């Protein structure tokens, strides 16, 4: 795990060193810069030592110094690739996965990406052909930002680092800001800064002097199968066991201490059970709990730890820590992220870092194996509209909404309303934020408000609906949009703030391709994640019966009424978000007042405002209360 950077306009390496300095947290163990002065190209790397600790200095070259590489992440199949390369006559000087890249490039050029199983962003400079190759892993576990100024290319693992060494500027992209407030993250190729972009997952870039920058996709998540007779559930569970076990084994390879994040849900419980089975010594497990609210899963995690015999560690994130921790975490992000669980993730990562350098998590299971309840509800809504005459839909929705509480039953009232599936999806994931934009936005954003239909059309363009079931379409959409934009970005930024590497066994591309062969209707049956639950029932029968679908949640509403209320009040009164006209001060003040007095829960709107405001203040040099 590292941070990488580079520039094609940096003959002395000054820009690379500046970018390295901005991301020490990503690699506190070592740093390096390689410069090709004649070509003006530099590569930089910060290193968190995990594999071949002694010999892993980056950037790294082949035997004659004609090909150089810098890697962020891990190539899990590097032992097999090393053997293959030696059989083909290559001499490897280290045991690192980075060295595999330069020799694979000698064999396959840019097509080396197809040989890799791992989480990565890497850069390769070929001095012979004067070609720079930059690539990102299939799912987007590792980030990569770049700026194309026309006369060259600059890139870095974090947006803050890119801005430190490239002429990116501090101008915000209003479209990206609007999308951030809708989704809670900046999706796709945009970044929050107007002069920078994100390389999408499964893509690579090539650059040569005087030539146009070329970007192409090398892998896409496969579309889900249509329902038809196929393998038995028992056979599918057996294949899942084989593939997931192999993936977990590959993620347990490290030359440093390693642990497992363990919550109360199916995903992490299954990973922990397999890790315990595959490990020759008791695994270390880590759980976070809270002293307020009703979302604590410590007891369930503790029970699992006893059953698998792990060395269990618990962190209680106390409310009196929140006023200092949350602003510090949110200010430290390279671009704003409104996932409420991010500070808690950072806290458990920091807690784990006291004992281990690598932690294994359960990210990706919901998207690949049909875990989110909305997949079932969206399918139900479409099925209902195929049977319910249009004139009856609106009256039925009003009748249900009039007498039903919020939550599961309240969603049933919304299901009856006639509307396109993608628009329904956007409204559900955006919670109340979509409707509030017109009143909450200031003059800098009001003209950028995209219509619901426009937002839905953008998502539909990512995943054409032809030949896909409703559940299958939205599972694929989440793999392309929500997973890299929110889930994986949260895990990467939170863990890297404390220099911890997080590995995700569910995001093995062979496992993903297997999951896509299983009809979504089977995956989402019952409580969802049918295959994962069935495998857990084989490994831990008693535990499986007690595991409902649980998200990694935090008591954000309580925090915003308590220790974070003064922080947000300061944001509304004096922060740059309101001063620059992105947010309407009076509207934000009203929302905060209603929330603090307990008259409504506005945490869905207030948390993104808090995260954006703290990030923007840091960008503008205002770190009050830091």
Image: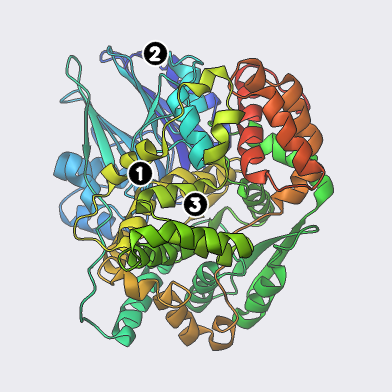
The foreground one among 210 and 217 is 217
To which residue does mark 3 refer?
428
Could you say where residue 85 lies in the image, as x and y percent from the top left? 21, 52
Q: Is residue 108 left or right of residue 565?
A: left
Q: Secondary structure at mark 1?
A: helix
To which residue does mark 1 refer?
98
Decide which of tag 1 and tag 3 comes sooner along the chain: 1
The residue positioned 39% from the left and 13% from the top of the image is 12
Decide which of tag 1 and tag 2 comes sooner along the chain: 2
Q: Quadrant of residue 496?
A: top right
- From the image, state whether disc 3 or disc 2 is nearer to you: 3
Give the total number of marks visible in the rendering: 3
Residue 538 shows which numbered tag? none
The answer to whether residue 309 is seen in the rendering is: yes
Residue 400 drawn above or below residue 482: below
To which residue does mark 2 refer?
12
Residue 237 drawn above or below residue 597: below
């Amino acid at each position: 795990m590292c941070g990488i950077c580079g520039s094609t306009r940096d003959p002395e390496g000054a820009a690379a060193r500046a970018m390295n300095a901005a991301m020490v947290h990503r690699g506190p163990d070592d740093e390096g810069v390689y410069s090709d002065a004649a070509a003006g190209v530099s590569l930089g790397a910060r290193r968190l030592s995990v594999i071949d600790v002694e010999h892993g200095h980056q950037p790294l070259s082949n035997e004659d110094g004609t090909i150089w590489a810098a890697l962020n992440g891990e190539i899990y199949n590097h032992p097999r690739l090393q053997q293959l390369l030696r059989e083909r006559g290559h001499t490897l000087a280290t045991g690192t996965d980075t060295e595999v890249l330069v020799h694979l490039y000698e064999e396959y050029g840019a097509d080396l990406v197809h040989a890799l199983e791992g989480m990565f962003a890497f850069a390769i400079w070929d001095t012979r052909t004067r070609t720079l190759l930059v690539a990102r892993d299939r799912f987007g576990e590792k980030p990569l930002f770049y700026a194309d100024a026309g006369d060259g290319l600059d890139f870095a693992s974090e947006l803050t680092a890119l801005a430190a060494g490239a002429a990116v500027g501090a101008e915000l992209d209003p479209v990206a800001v609007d999308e951030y407030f809708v989704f809670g993250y900046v999706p796709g190729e945009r970044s929050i800064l107007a002069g920078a972009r994100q390389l999408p997952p499964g893509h690579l870039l090539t650059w040569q002097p005087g030539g146009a920058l070329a970007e192409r996709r090398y892998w896409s998540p496969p579309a889900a199968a249509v329902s038809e007779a196929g393998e038995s559930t028992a056979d599918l569970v057996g294949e899942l066991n084989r593939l997931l076990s192999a993936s977990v084994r590959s993620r347990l390879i490290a030359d440093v201490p390693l642990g497992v994040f363990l919550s109360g849900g199916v995903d992490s419980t299954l990973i922990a059970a397999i890790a315990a089975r595959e490990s020759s010594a008791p695994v270390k497990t880590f759980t976070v709990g809270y002293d307020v609210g009703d979302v604590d899963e410590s007891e369930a995690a503790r029970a699992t730890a006893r059953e698998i015999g792990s060395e269990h560690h618990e962190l209680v994130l106390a409310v009196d820590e929140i006023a200092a921790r949350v602003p510090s975490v949110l200010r430290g992000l390279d671009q704003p992220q409104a996932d409420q669980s991010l500070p808690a993730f950072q806290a458990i990562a920091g807690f784990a870092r006291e004992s281990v350098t690598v932690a294994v998590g359960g990210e990706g299971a919901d998207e690949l194996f049909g875990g989110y309840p909305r997949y079932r509800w969206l399918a139900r809504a479409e099925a209902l509209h195929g049977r319910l005459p249009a004139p009856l839909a609106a009256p039925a929705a009003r009748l249900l909404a009039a007498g039903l509480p919020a939550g599961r039953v309240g969603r049933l009232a919304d299901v009856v309303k006639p509307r396109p599936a993608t628009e329904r999806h956007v409204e559900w994931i955006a919670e109340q934020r979509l409707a509030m934009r017109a009143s909450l936005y200031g003059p800098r954003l009001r003209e950028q408000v995209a219509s619901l239909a426009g937002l839905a059309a953008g998502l539909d363009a990512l995943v054409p609906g032809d030949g896909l079931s409703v559940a299958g379409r939205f599972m694929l959409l989440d793999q392309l949009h929500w997973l890299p934009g929110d889930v994986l970005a949260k895990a990467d930024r939170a863990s890297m703030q404390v220099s911890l590497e997080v590995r995700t066994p569910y995001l093995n591309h062979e496992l993903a391709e297997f999951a896509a062969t299983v009809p979504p209707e089977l995956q989402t049956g019952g409580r969802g994640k049918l295959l994962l639950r069935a495998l857990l029932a084989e490994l831990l029968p008693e535990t499986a019966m007690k595991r409902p679908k649980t998200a990694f949640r935090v008591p954000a509403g309580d925090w915003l009424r308590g220790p974070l209320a003064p922080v947000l009040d300061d944001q509304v009164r004096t922060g740059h978000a309101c001063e620059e006209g992105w947010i309407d001060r009076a509207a934000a003040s009203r929302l905060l007042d209603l929330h603090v007095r307990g008259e409504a829960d506005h945490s869905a709107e207030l948390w993104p405002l808090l995260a954006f405001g703290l990030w923007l203040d840091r960008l503008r040099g205002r770190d009050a209360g830091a």
